[in-house]
Image (spheres, grey):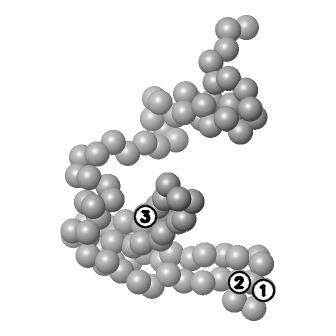
Amino acid sequence: MTAPVVVIHFLADGDTTYRVFGDGPVRVLFVDEKAPHDRVYEWLSREPMEDLAAIVPEGGAVGSKSDARHPAIANAIEAALEGRPHLRPVE
């Protein structure tokens, strides 16, 4: 059995979807400090593992904080947020 997969999908239009694929022991909790009377919400909906391939193709590239490209990607994101070029002369 494959472990469940939680996908937080940021769409091009700015929308976000949350989906859990597969069955098994995983809890997905959302904590929203703006909703004090319903601050912690548990996502219970599950979808078939087969449907995951429509979002993350089998064998597709999945980056992480530990991969070799992370520093370059992090620099590009920080540069965009700070409004500076992502390439600059070595100091």
Q: Quadrant of the C terminus?
A: top right
Q: Amino acid at mark 3?
A: Val
At horizontal 21% and vertical 68% (from top left) the residue drawn is: 50
Residue 66 marker: none
Q: Earlier in the sequence, mark 2 or mark 3?
A: 3
Q: Quadrant of residue 85?
A: top right
Residue 40 coordinates in the image, percent (x, y): 65, 83
Q: Quadrant of the N terminus?
A: bottom left
Q: Secondary structure at mark 2?
A: loop
Q: Earlier in the sequence, mark 1 or mark 3?
A: 3
29 sits left or right of 33 in the view: left
Q: Residues within 10 Å of mark 1 (few under 14, many from 20)?
A: few
Distance Cα–Cα, label 1 vs label 2: 5 Å
Residue 7 marker: 3
Q: Return the residue at label 1.
A: 36
Q: Quadrant of residue 34?
A: bottom right
Q: Is 6 situated above or below 78?
A: below
Residue 64 coordinates in the image, percent (x, y): 47, 43
Q: Amino acid at mark 2?
A: Arg
66 sits left or right of 62 in the view: right
Q: Amino acid at mark 1?
A: Pro
At horizontal 73% and vertical 26% (from top left) the residue drawn is: 84
Q: Return the residue at label 2.
A: 39
Residue 59 coordinates in the image, percent (x, y): 24, 46
CB contact under 8 Å: marks 1 and 2: yes
